[in-house]
Structures are given as C-alpha cells and as structure tokens.
Amino acid sequence: MSAANLLCFPHAGGSSFYYERWRSLFTARNIDLHIAPYPHRDRRINEPMPKLVQELAEDLYMRLMSELGGNYVTWGHSMGAIIAYEVTKRAIERLGNPPILFTVSSSSAPCDAQFIDTKTLVTPDGIRRVLRRYGGVEEAALVNRDFMEYFTPILVDDMMMLARYEDNQPAVLSCPLLLLEGSEDTSRIAFWEIYTSATSEVRFYPGGHFFITTHAREVAATISHRLSALTPKHSPFKLKSLRVE
C-alpha cells in the first residue's frame, strides 16, 4: 500500500497530548499520523468550541483538506468517531474521496450517539462522576484543583456539543469499517455496520471505554495490519443517503 495519512479524532476533553504517544506505535513508513486540531485546547486554546458537531466538522474539514485529498484513514475514539464521520461525509461529497479505512473505537453509531446525562455537568462532583464512569483520567488528576479548573470547561463544552448532536443527513460511507470496542464498555458499536456499503470488522479487547490506553500496542498493530491488506481506491464515490428508522 502507498503512503496514507492516519487522521486521529480525539475523544471529549481529549487533545494532542494524549494521542502524541501513538506516533511511535505507528512506525511503518506508510502511515503518517495527524491529530485533528480541536479548538479550546493546544494551539487553539483561546478559540471557543463550536456549539454543533457539524460546525466543528466544517472547521476541521477546511484545516485537513490537503490530507483528505490523498490516501487517508480516519480513526475516531468516542466522540471523535462522530466528528470523523461528519468530516468524512464532507470529504466524500466534495472531493469524491473516501478514506481507505474508517476506524471507530468506543463509540455508538451516529443514530445513537447523543450524550443525554447533561445534568451531571452542572456541578464539579457530577463532572467527576462522568469522568470516573468513562475512565481515561487518573484519580490524582480528578482531585487536582488546577487540572480540573483547566480541564472542566473543555470537557463540558465538548459534551454539550455532543448532547446537541443529530445526524440530520445520515449517509452510507463507501469504505470499510474497523470497529474496536472494550468488552466492558456500553457503547453500541455494532450499529455502525449500517453506515457502510463495504465490509465491516469488529474487534473486542479486555477493558472499558478507554481500553485503548492499556492495549495501545495491540490497537496500533490491528490498524496497521488492516491497512496492509487494503488497496487504496482512486475512483470518485458518491455519498449515499441512509434512512434510519
């Protein structure tokens, strides 16, 4: 397979800091990792998070357009999978260029992806309950006032954006799906299978929502192995609409 860009879309509250460690795991010369530059963190710390997922997807599509024009792979974890889906729809519709592979980890499908427990985001204790439920943040950080003062506005804005999400233009993607899930997670990942006209593969790993932390090497190896078996498509594709009952 020729070189491909691996476009990584972080989870709610996530940033490049968490995913930079993955760069060393994708050592193959044909994989170039790019982390989607979300607002309200990293170099965009002073930019507000959009209110709607579709607005964020439009922003990221414009910023990643050069990578989306060639051979690329998407990988979204949790909320990141929904953002990757919306960005991918735009790449197919406007560039006629689907990803070689669309990878999902720990995310329910777009028809089932809203965050509904918004009342827990009102108080610091409620936010800690959400973080303990999903994992991904160490207990020492949860009781660190400086960390929580920095992190809480980012997380709340991300989760509220996801709470507003509606897949108002459901679509079938013309690319294979790789669906990764923790055996103890509650995400309904299998529903993603209706979102592709190509093949889908489901892999389970021990652990919960953030199984990717303890099984990083295995996950990277799975994505790399799956890519090695694929042949990039260069012909244009048309986005098909999907009717979700």
Image (cartoon, rainbow, N blue to C red):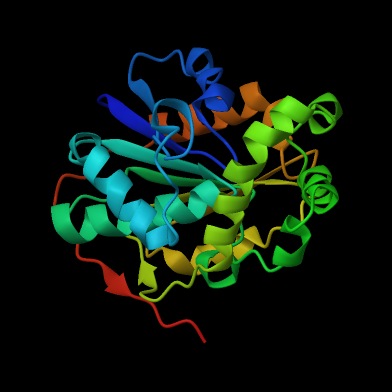
Q: Does residue 117 appear in this view? A: no
Image quadrant assignment for residue 65: top left
Residue 169 appears at what percent x and percent y? 35, 74
Extreme residue in the bottom direction: 245
Seen in the image, is 47 located left or right of residue 70? right
Residue at x 83%, y 43% (from the top left corner): 132
Q: Does residue 123 appear in this view? A: yes
Camera-side residue: 85 or 41?
Answer: 41
Residue at x 59%, y 26% (from the top left corner): 18
Image quadrant assignment for residue 218: top right
Seen in the image, is 240 located left or right of residue 42? left
Camera-side residue: 76 or 159?
Answer: 159
Camera-side residue: 68 or 52?
Answer: 52
Residue at x 81%, y 45% (from the top left corner): 128
Which quadrant of the rendered structure holds the N terminus? top left
Image position of 172 with respect to 47: above or below: below
Seen in the image, is 219 located left or right of residue 141? left
Residue 138 appears at what percent x and percent y? 80, 28
Image position of 31 with respect to 113: above or below: above
Image position of 49 with respect to 73: above or below: below
Residue 36 appears at what percent x and percent y? 40, 36
Residue 158 appears at what percent x and percent y? 55, 51
Q: How many marks?
A: 0
